[in-house]
Amino acid sequence: DTGVSQNPRHKITKRGQNVTFRCDPISEHNRLYWYRQTLGQGPEFLTYFQNEAQLEKSRLLSDRFSAERPKGSFSTLEIQRTEQGDSAMYLCASSFLGLRITSDTQYFGPGTRLTVL
Amino acid sequence: AQTVTQSQPEMSVQEAETVTLSCTYDTSESNYYLFWYKQPPSRQMILVIRQEAYKQQNATENRFSVNFQKAAKSFSLKISDSQLGDTAMYFCAFRGNDMRFGAGTRLTVKP
Protein backbone atom coordinates (compact mmCIF):
# COMPACT_ATOMS: atom_id res chain seq x y z
CA ASP A 1 0.00 0.00 0.00
CA THR A 2 1.42 3.37 -0.97
CA GLY A 3 -0.57 5.47 1.46
CA VAL A 4 -3.20 8.12 0.94
CA SER A 5 -3.22 9.65 -2.52
CA GLN A 6 -4.91 12.82 -3.73
CA ASN A 7 -5.60 14.15 -7.20
CA PRO A 8 -4.95 16.59 -8.64
CA ARG A 9 -1.99 17.91 -6.68
CA HIS A 10 -2.57 21.43 -7.96
CA LYS A 11 -5.63 23.14 -9.35
CA ILE A 12 -5.93 26.67 -10.66
CA THR A 13 -9.41 27.87 -11.45
CA LYS A 14 -11.29 31.06 -12.07
CA ARG A 15 -13.73 32.45 -9.58
CA GLY A 16 -17.19 31.02 -10.05
CA GLN A 17 -16.04 27.70 -11.49
CA ASN A 18 -16.69 24.34 -9.88
CA VAL A 19 -13.83 22.07 -8.86
CA THR A 20 -13.67 18.47 -7.70
CA PHE A 21 -10.87 16.74 -5.82
CA ARG A 22 -10.35 13.05 -5.27
CA CYS A 23 -8.89 11.16 -2.34
CA ASP A 24 -7.93 7.48 -2.27
CA PRO A 25 -7.41 6.30 1.29
CA ILE A 26 -5.21 3.52 2.59
CA SER A 27 -6.84 0.20 1.82
CA GLU A 28 -9.04 -1.16 4.59
CA HIS A 29 -9.25 2.22 6.33
CA ASN A 30 -12.86 2.81 7.19
CA ARG A 31 -12.61 6.49 8.05
CA LEU A 32 -11.81 9.33 5.70
CA TYR A 33 -11.37 12.97 6.62
CA TRP A 34 -11.19 16.21 4.67
CA TYR A 35 -9.35 19.26 5.97
CA ARG A 36 -8.51 22.70 4.68
CA GLN A 37 -5.18 24.28 5.46
CA THR A 38 -4.21 27.87 4.76
CA LEU A 39 -0.67 29.16 4.80
CA GLY A 40 0.86 29.17 8.26
CA GLN A 41 -2.11 27.50 9.91
CA GLY A 42 -2.99 24.04 11.10
CA PRO A 43 -5.50 21.88 9.26
CA GLU A 44 -9.12 22.86 9.76
CA PHE A 45 -11.60 20.01 9.89
CA LEU A 46 -14.25 19.99 7.15
CA THR A 47 -15.98 16.63 7.23
CA TYR A 48 -15.46 12.92 7.72
CA PHE A 49 -16.90 9.60 6.66
CA GLN A 50 -17.08 6.23 8.27
CA ASN A 51 -17.39 3.82 5.38
CA GLU A 52 -19.87 5.52 3.05
CA ALA A 53 -21.70 7.47 5.76
CA GLN A 54 -20.87 11.12 6.26
CA LEU A 55 -20.92 11.39 10.03
CA GLU A 56 -19.94 14.97 10.65
CA LYS A 57 -19.63 18.27 8.85
CA SER A 58 -18.02 21.38 10.22
CA ARG A 59 -20.40 24.21 10.94
CA LEU A 60 -17.95 26.40 9.10
CA LEU A 61 -18.46 24.40 5.92
CA SER A 62 -20.29 26.43 3.33
CA ASP A 63 -23.14 24.80 1.42
CA ARG A 64 -21.02 25.28 -1.70
CA PHE A 65 -18.92 22.37 -0.42
CA SER A 66 -20.06 18.80 -0.79
CA ALA A 67 -18.30 15.52 -0.23
CA GLU A 68 -19.13 11.97 -1.13
CA ARG A 69 -17.76 8.53 -0.49
CA PRO A 70 -20.17 6.42 -2.51
CA LYS A 71 -18.67 2.98 -2.05
CA GLY A 72 -16.80 3.51 1.16
CA SER A 73 -13.47 3.67 -0.63
CA PHE A 74 -12.39 6.83 -2.47
CA SER A 75 -13.96 10.19 -1.75
CA THR A 76 -14.57 13.35 -3.71
CA LEU A 77 -14.81 16.92 -2.46
CA GLU A 78 -16.58 19.39 -4.71
CA ILE A 79 -16.57 23.14 -4.36
CA GLN A 80 -19.20 24.97 -6.36
CA ARG A 81 -18.95 28.59 -7.46
CA THR A 82 -15.44 28.95 -6.13
CA GLU A 83 -14.39 32.15 -4.40
CA GLN A 84 -10.92 33.57 -3.86
CA GLY A 85 -11.24 32.76 -0.18
CA ASP A 86 -11.40 29.07 -1.10
CA SER A 87 -7.74 29.15 -2.08
CA ALA A 88 -6.00 26.73 0.26
CA MET A 89 -4.49 23.28 0.57
CA TYR A 90 -7.14 20.59 0.85
CA LEU A 91 -5.93 17.61 2.81
CA CYS A 92 -7.37 14.15 3.01
CA ALA A 93 -6.59 11.68 5.76
CA SER A 94 -7.69 8.14 6.49
CA SER A 95 -7.75 5.97 9.56
CA PHE A 96 -8.99 2.64 10.83
CA LEU A 97 -11.28 2.58 13.80
CA GLY A 98 -12.30 -0.78 15.14
CA LEU A 99 -13.11 -2.56 18.34
CA ARG A 100 -9.47 -3.11 19.20
CA ILE A 101 -8.02 -0.04 17.51
CA THR A 102 -9.55 3.04 19.02
CA SER A 103 -7.02 5.81 18.59
CA ASP A 104 -8.24 6.92 15.15
CA THR A 105 -4.68 7.69 14.10
CA GLN A 106 -4.92 9.53 10.82
CA TYR A 107 -2.57 9.24 7.87
CA PHE A 108 -2.49 12.17 5.52
CA GLY A 109 -2.25 12.51 1.78
CA PRO A 110 -0.07 15.09 0.02
CA GLY A 111 -2.96 17.50 -0.45
CA THR A 112 -4.48 19.39 -3.36
CA ARG A 113 -3.46 23.01 -3.60
CA LEU A 114 -6.31 25.13 -4.95
CA THR A 115 -5.75 28.60 -6.34
CA VAL A 116 -8.80 30.63 -7.25
CA LEU A 117 -8.04 33.57 -9.50
CA ALA B 1 -15.34 23.30 22.06
CA GLN B 2 -11.85 21.90 22.22
CA THR B 3 -8.99 24.28 21.55
CA VAL B 4 -5.37 23.43 20.93
CA THR B 5 -2.76 26.11 21.56
CA GLN B 6 0.83 26.13 20.41
CA SER B 7 2.38 29.22 21.89
CA GLN B 8 5.67 29.08 19.97
CA PRO B 9 5.20 30.10 16.33
CA GLU B 10 8.87 29.56 15.56
CA MET B 11 11.80 27.85 17.20
CA SER B 12 15.33 26.96 16.25
CA VAL B 13 17.85 24.51 17.60
CA GLN B 14 21.40 23.53 16.82
CA GLU B 15 21.98 20.17 15.27
CA ALA B 16 22.45 17.43 17.89
CA GLU B 17 20.84 19.47 20.65
CA THR B 18 17.48 18.98 22.34
CA VAL B 19 14.37 21.10 21.82
CA THR B 20 10.92 21.06 23.41
CA LEU B 21 7.77 22.21 21.66
CA SER B 22 4.80 23.23 23.78
CA CYS B 23 1.14 22.41 23.39
CA THR B 24 -1.82 23.00 25.65
CA TYR B 25 -5.41 22.04 25.06
CA ASP B 26 -8.79 22.59 26.57
CA THR B 27 -11.43 19.89 26.89
CA SER B 28 -14.08 18.56 29.21
CA GLU B 29 -13.72 15.04 27.86
CA SER B 30 -11.93 12.35 29.84
CA ASN B 31 -11.10 9.97 27.00
CA TYR B 32 -9.15 11.36 24.10
CA TYR B 33 -5.96 11.07 22.10
CA LEU B 34 -3.19 13.53 21.44
CA PHE B 35 -0.87 13.59 18.48
CA TRP B 36 2.15 15.38 17.16
CA TYR B 37 2.38 15.63 13.39
CA LYS B 38 5.31 16.87 11.34
CA GLN B 39 4.93 18.68 8.01
CA PRO B 40 8.26 19.20 6.21
CA PRO B 41 8.46 22.01 3.66
CA SER B 42 6.33 21.15 0.62
CA ARG B 43 5.78 17.63 1.86
CA GLN B 44 2.90 15.80 3.40
CA MET B 45 2.05 15.58 7.05
CA ILE B 46 3.32 12.54 8.90
CA LEU B 47 2.61 11.22 12.37
CA VAL B 48 5.42 11.68 14.87
CA ILE B 49 3.96 10.34 18.08
CA ARG B 50 0.65 9.50 19.73
CA GLN B 51 -0.52 9.53 23.35
CA GLU B 52 -3.62 7.95 24.82
CA ALA B 53 -5.06 10.11 27.59
CA TYR B 54 -5.84 7.10 29.78
CA LYS B 55 -2.16 6.09 29.84
CA GLN B 56 0.02 7.74 32.45
CA GLN B 57 3.24 6.65 30.80
CA ASN B 58 4.64 9.16 28.36
CA ALA B 59 4.95 7.95 24.78
CA THR B 60 8.37 7.61 23.19
CA GLU B 61 9.40 7.01 19.60
CA ASN B 62 13.18 6.90 19.15
CA ARG B 63 14.40 10.51 19.49
CA PHE B 64 10.88 11.84 20.08
CA SER B 65 9.15 11.81 23.43
CA VAL B 66 6.28 13.61 25.05
CA ASN B 67 5.62 15.08 28.45
CA PHE B 68 1.91 14.54 29.00
CA GLN B 69 0.42 16.33 31.99
CA LYS B 70 -3.27 15.48 31.95
CA ALA B 71 -4.27 17.67 34.88
CA ALA B 72 -2.51 20.65 33.37
CA LYS B 73 -3.75 19.74 29.88
CA SER B 74 -0.26 20.01 28.54
CA PHE B 75 1.35 17.87 25.87
CA SER B 76 4.89 18.91 24.95
CA LEU B 77 7.17 17.24 22.41
CA LYS B 78 10.85 16.75 23.08
CA ILE B 79 13.20 16.10 20.19
CA SER B 80 16.60 14.79 21.24
CA ASP B 81 19.74 14.81 19.11
CA SER B 82 18.07 17.12 16.57
CA GLN B 83 18.83 16.41 12.94
CA LEU B 84 18.63 18.65 9.89
CA GLY B 85 15.76 16.51 8.63
CA ASP B 86 13.70 17.50 11.66
CA THR B 87 13.22 20.95 10.14
CA ALA B 88 9.46 21.22 9.62
CA MET B 89 6.20 22.56 10.92
CA TYR B 90 5.02 20.62 13.93
CA PHE B 91 1.34 20.41 14.73
CA CYS B 92 -0.21 19.29 17.97
CA ALA B 93 -3.61 17.63 17.51
CA PHE B 94 -6.45 16.56 19.77
CA ARG B 95 -8.89 13.77 18.99
CA GLY B 96 -11.91 13.48 21.20
CA ASN B 97 -15.43 13.99 19.95
CA ASP B 98 -13.85 15.99 17.18
CA MET B 99 -10.41 16.58 15.72
CA ARG B 100 -8.56 19.84 16.21
CA PHE B 101 -5.07 21.02 15.35
CA GLY B 102 -2.95 23.76 16.79
CA ALA B 103 -1.58 26.53 14.59
CA GLY B 104 1.83 24.89 14.46
CA THR B 105 5.42 25.60 15.44
CA ARG B 106 7.99 26.10 12.73
CA LEU B 107 11.17 24.35 13.83
CA THR B 108 14.49 25.03 12.15
CA VAL B 109 17.48 22.83 12.89
CA LYS B 110 20.71 24.70 12.25
CA PRO B 111 23.94 22.98 11.23
Image: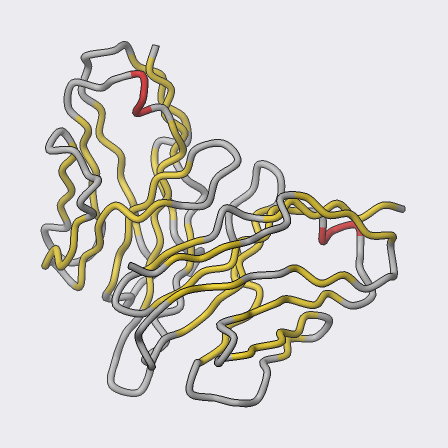
Query: Quick one: quadrant of the N terminus of chain B?
Result: bottom left
Seen at 29% across and 45% down, the residue is A23
- Tell whether B82 sits left or right of A46: right
Seen at 55% across and 48% down, the residue is B104
> How many numbered discs?
0
User: Please, is residue A9 above or below residue B1 in the view?
Assistant: above
The location of residue B69, given as percent across then percent down, is 55, 79
The location of residue B40, given as percent across then percent down, is 62, 45
- Tell whether A34 sits left or right of B57: left
The location of residue B34, given as percent across then percent down, is 46, 70
Residue A37: name its quadrant.
Answer: top left
Seen at 18% across and 57% down, the residue is A49
The location of residue A108, given as percent across then percent down, is 42, 53
Residue A99: name its quadrant.
Answer: bottom left
Residue situated in front as seen by the camera: A78 or B75: B75
Residue situated in front as seen by the camera: B56 or A46: B56
Residue B59: name its quadrant.
Answer: bottom right
Residue situated in front as seen by the camera: A21 or B56: B56
Seen at 49% across and 66% down, the residue is B35
Q: Going by the picture, which residue comes out furthest to the front?
A: B72
User: Please, is residue B74 above or below residue A14 in the view?
Assistant: below
- Tell whether B13 sits left or right of A90: right
The type of colouring in the image is secondary structure
